[in-house]
Amino acid sequence: MPALPPLILSCLLDPEAAHFFNGLRKKHFPPEKNFLDAHLTLFHHLPGEPSLFSGIEELCSRQAVINLAVQEVVFIGKGVAYRIESPVLKQLHKSLQQQWKEWLTPQDKQGLWPHVTVQNKVAPETARQLQKELAERFVAFETTARGLQLWEYLGGPWKPVKTFLFTAR
């Protein structure tokens, strides 16, 4: 039986923030390499294991919407991202790491660095210039994560599997 595609877990961003980040991504990400909308990834390579779903559903039923502080525009080598701070999101990530520790890749065992990439896979000079331009007019802002999204990784594009809303009050 063939192996199931790996899964990716990301945050479901507030629609206004998603629109903002997607606009920048569409404008600045090389179109031939841009298979996705802007996203905040929590786990990059989970096994395609259906038993994960119940754990995510349970966690989301106990979680309220999470506040995210968009702090700054950062240079990431060959791209640009918005750095995000959220102690609650980091705690949620740690909790999931504990639950899934035997399945995690070395990358997913690391601490969470929350960010949304709006440009990648360009020359460093191009990325530095965009970071400078965006940083000059950047004003920190607050947004929210409304849930989690599970995706199948298809070697470039992602296929949506399920969305889990945070439902606690």
Image: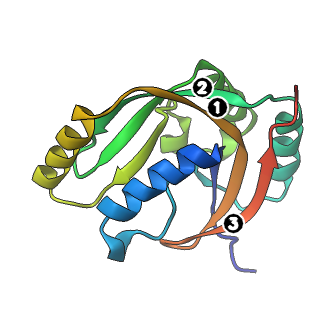
Above or below for 85 versus 44: above
Kindly identify the residue that appears in the image at 53 percent across and 72 percent down.
157
Please state if 123 lies on the left or on the right of 33 as rendered: left
How many numbered dots are placed on residues in this image? Answer: 3
Please state if 147 lies on the left or on the right of 156 as rendered: right
> Residue 29 location, x and y as percent?
33, 62
Q: What residue would you read off at disc 3?
A: 160
Please identify the quarter of the rendering in which residue 83 is found. top left
User: Disc 3 marks which amino acid?
Assistant: Pro
User: Disc 1 marks which amino acid?
Assistant: His
Residue 169 visible in the shown view: yes
User: How many neighbours does mark 1 have within 10 angstroms: few (below 14), some (14-19), or many (20 or more)?
Assistant: some
Provide the secondary structure element on which disc 1 rests: helix
Give the mark nearer the N terminus: 3 vs 2.
2
> Residue 140 location, x and y as percent?
41, 26
Q: CA distance from mark 3 to mark 1?
A: 20 Å
